[in-house]
Amino acid sequence: MSIKKANEPIHFFRRRTILFYSIIIGVFVGSLICLALVYIEDQSTAHINRLTQNSTNGIALLIEDDLSQRINSLSEFTKLSQLTTNMTDGYWQSISNALYDGQRGYHTLGWVDKTYHIRKVTPFEGNENAKNFNLALKPAALAALMKAQEKNTVTMTMPLQSIHGELGLGIYVPVFRESEGTPKVEGFISSLILFNTYFTEILPSYLLTDHQIAVFIDEQEIYSDTANQDLTNTVWRRQISFQLQGQTWQIRTSPTSAFLEYSHYRTMRVLLVLGILLTVLITIAAYTTLSTRNKANVIRDERNKVRHLLKNLPGMAYQSFNMADWPLILVSEGCETLTGYTRAEFEAHDVLWGKIIHPDDYDRVHKVVHEAIIHQQPYELEYRIIDKNQETHFVWEKGEAVVSLLNDSMILEGFITDLTSIKQAEDEVARSHEFSDAVVNAVIEAVITIDQKGRIKSFNNAAQRMFGYCADEVINQSVNILIPSTETYDHDRHIANYVKSNIPKIMGVGRELEAKRKDGTVFPIQISVSEISNQDNKMFVGLIRDIGAQRLSEDRARKHIEQMAHADRLNSLGEMAAGIAHEVNQPLTAISLFSQSGKTLCNNGKFDKLPEIFDKLSQHARRAGAVLERMQTMTRQGDRQKELVECRALISEVVKLAESEGRMRDINIQVNFKQSSHVEVYIDRVQIQQVLLNLLRNGMEAMQSIDLSNGNVIELNSDFNDSENITISVVDSGCGLDINMTEKLFTAFASTKQNGMGIGLSISKSIIEDHGGSIHYAKNASAGSVFYFTLPVV
């Protein structure tokens, strides 16, 4: 027992004392509530009487104002409308409908002629009996009509029985017309108001529901609502009187039993019950308050302990509202170390947690927290915040949504700590890895990392190009997929021996082996392997070089030496045949091109162009024969077959012969005649054409060797620069010539082409010099070469 008493909380009052004081407070409060109920009952009665009197005054004002407006509107209407006894039914309907629809409450509108007969009625439906009715038969109506005619004013009847059998009121407005300077009555606009319908229309529904209403004119009751109760009870009844058109109107109102029950008696009963309940609740509240004071002190003590604990944590604990930007309810003192802002700033909502979250991370944080709340799960995430000094920190947060015990609202509780130093260390490691990966991927040799079980752990770009695998295809695969099946046993044995004995054997030593690509092809490699120091597992790095190209180059060099020896033996034999072959090759090439063109035309069904193709074939065949004949002539001593040829015609013929080859090479031949008159030379036409064709072909091949990067136009120019010689030049935009080549350019077997014989320019020089001219080379100013020769003019 002593232990139990020692552990009980210390209270300010004993339980009996607390109960006694609670009862005293309850009795005192009950007395105050009784006094308040008496006062409320008096005030409620006075309020209902005031409300009833105000309603009575409002009804009187509403009736008086409505009838006055009707009288005024009828008077104004007669002044504005051209109403006569002879007016058409259509005109009457248009103006009467406007008046009838414009102001609710009329039963009928009618036109009464000066004999007091109703001639027109609106609405006609339901009022057929009123048409042609003589109002003189109604004394009250007749008196009002005569008064209106005599005084030229609007009059109202006394309450009268309408032809429909209901009590109502008539309003008459005289209509006068000037006749010989004297106004004479033309007729009357009459309106009939039935009291039951009229008061239902103009009085608000809530007044008819909540009040008993009776209306009197000169002590004659014209309207009474007897559905609820009579008006003999003078305790609640209120009345008011007013004068209108010489008549005394009186309004009497009294609240209905239902209204009194709802607004007064039931309210007082409810207040009485509430007073009793309030007394009991206050008594219980007093008891609870006194009882909880001690518990509050205990909670306050426990809270101080928790606050001291949170103060020593490396971060901050929080409670926040589940609202936009998460305003904090409570926060530990670690917030100032983490953010630079104080607890007071957070708890006063001068600083909102959502506002210090980095803008780029806010949407992600909001999404994670929102989804965790929906799924009723804790949330955990990392993001960035911006502190008071505008510095960025990485933080880790873990929290959970809970329901507040105070108001059942959703709040967030959690803990946030700084991860900036950890993130910086991770970034340094990541940068280090990126740097090492970049270095490895930049190496031209393949670099592969494997573990002690022979599984591939890294595969650089060069290895991917060398073996044909993507990195994702080989990572964590056995390295044996890169080794031919004949060598996999030796490789596994080397790895196992090294792991067991730590004796390097192949480690760090370059060896030549064979490897296997993804497509199954085997190729030679040179490999060096080194160990990576690792406390957990052994790792190996292999540096691999593809030596297939090296071996192929060595084989090619050996074969080239053998071919050079063979070519030296054939050189002497080829010198004689080369000259003939070079000259005949050009027309034969043209014949081949035109043959292919003819075949294409046949395949396309364009037979109409075949004669032209056959003429070209015949022309180049004859030309080949002429070349052979000229070569025979050159071997014999004697004169050539020379003739007078006009230079323009000579160049035009050459262009026609070369244009087909130019189109195939996508090169345009541009001709420039710089001489102003016809110039003739005495030449062997075939040989000079052969020279020009050779120069054009050389120029086009030079331009094509650089993919026409300097343009696709080759120029053929002729210039009569003096009185004795004409200069013909070929200007290309090709690759040009090396300066060392220009010295032996026109010698036999000197060529810049990979497969050239070096015969063309040598023969061309012999032909030009045999014609008394000279041939030269110059560098093109923009790009390429200029070959030109001169011929004597006749």
Image (cartoon, grey):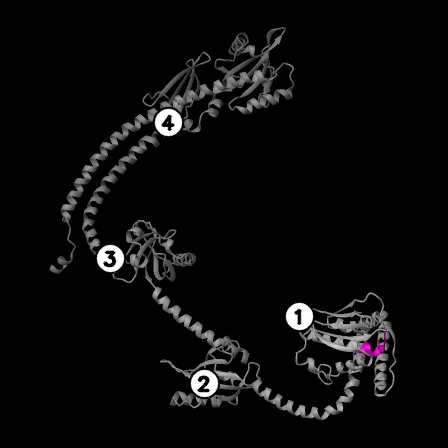
Answer yes or no: do the residues labelled 1 and 2 have beta carbons within 8 Å? no
Spatial separation of the CA atoms under disc 4 and disc 3: 65 Å
- State which tag comes first along the sequence, 3 or 2: 3
Q: Position of residue 59 (x, y in %)?
A: 42, 22
Q: Which residue carries the number 4 mark?
A: 256
Q: Residue at x 86, y 69 (%)?
A: 608
| Residue neighbourhood size for the residue with mark 3, other residues' Cα within 10 Å, grouped as few (<14), some (14–19), many (≥20) | some
The spot of residue 547 in percent (x, y) is 55, 85
Name the residue tied to disc 3: 307
- Disc number placed over residue 709 in the picture, else none: 1
Q: CA distance from mark 1 to mark 2?
A: 47 Å
Q: Nearer the viewer, residue 411 or 313?
A: 313
Instruction: Point out the tag, 4 or 2, that comes first from the N-terminus.
Output: 4
Q: Looking at the image, tell me whether mark 1 or mark 2 is earlier in sequence order.
A: 2
Tell me, yes or no, whether the two marked residues, 3 and 2, touch with CB atoms within 8 Å: no
Q: Can you tell which of label 4 and label 2 is closer to the viewer?
A: 2
Of tags 3 and 1, the one toward the viewer is 1
Q: Is residue 683 magenta?
A: yes
Bounds of the magenta segment:
681-690
Report the mark closest to the observer, 1 or 2.
1
Q: Secondary structure at mark 2?
A: strand
